């Protein structure tokens, strides 16, 4: 159903519940959506699956107010709304640009590319920040 240029894959069509409520003169669109995605972790590049949930809310108007750009209002001039394309736009807009397989992902070793979640590599520990290196040489003297 959806595609994205960030290497992210949608495992099945988005599930959504949308309702349109008339509230004292203005019409509000509310939707809850769930998407099942597969993505490459931004740190370790491992493929992971995740379910993301969203809530979207818009006010439907027949004419957009001037200077309105934040997407709160949606124009529906003839009282028709293409909920599929609205949902797709909303989801693509809200997708995080960086996804991690887990919050504590250790990523890959910058030297050898070893996956540090699996185990430490034999590269020498952390590179010492050159500014700290000066300090440590002062301290050891
Ligand atoms: Zn990861
Ligand atoms: Zn390494």
Image: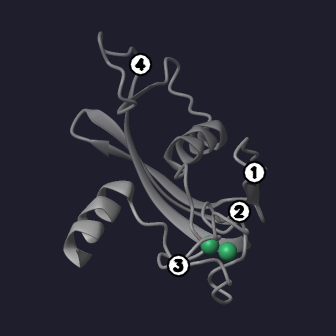
Q: Number of marks in the image? A: 4
Check disc 4 and report the residue beneath it.
62
- Eyeballing the image, is 77 above or below 130? above
- Viewer-nearest residue: 111 or 67: 111
How many angstroms separate mark 3 from mark 1 (CA)? 32 Å
Q: Secondary structure at mark 1?
A: loop
The residue that appears at 41% across and 19% down in the rendered structure is 62
Q: Is mark 2 within 8 Å of ligand 1?
A: no
Q: Which numbered disc, 3 or 2, marks the residue closer to the eye?
A: 3
Q: Position of residue 100 (x, y in %)?
A: 57, 67
- Viewer-nearest residue: 16 or 103: 103
The residue that appears at 55% across and 66% down in the rendered structure is 52
Quadrant position of residue 109? bottom right
How many angstroms separate mark 4 from mark 1 (CA)? 37 Å
Check disc 3 and report the residue beneath it.
125
Q: Position of residue 118 (x, y in %)?
A: 68, 88
Q: Earlier in the sequence, mark 3 or mark 1?
A: 1
Q: Which numbered disc, 3 or 1, marks the residue closer to the eye?
A: 3
Check disc 2 and report the residue beneath it.
39
């Amino acid at each position: 159903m959806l595609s994205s240029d960030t290497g992210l894959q949608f495992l099945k069509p988005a599930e959504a519940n949308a309702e349109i409520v008339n509230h004292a003169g203005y019409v509000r669109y509310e939707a809850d959506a769930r998407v099942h995605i597969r993505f490459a972790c931004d740190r370790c590049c491992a493929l992971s699956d995740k379910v993301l949930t969203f809530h979207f809310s818009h006010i439907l108007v027949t004419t957009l107010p001037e200077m309105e750009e934040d997407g709160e209002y949606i124009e529906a001039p003839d009282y028709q709304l293409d909920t599929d394309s609205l949902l797709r736009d909303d989801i693509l807009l809200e997708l995080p640009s960086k996804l991690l397989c887990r919050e504590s992902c250790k990523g890959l070793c910058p030297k050898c590319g070893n996956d540090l979640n699996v185990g430490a590599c034999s590269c020498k520990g952390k590179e010492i920040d050159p500014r700290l290196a000066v300090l440590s040489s002062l301290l050891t003297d």
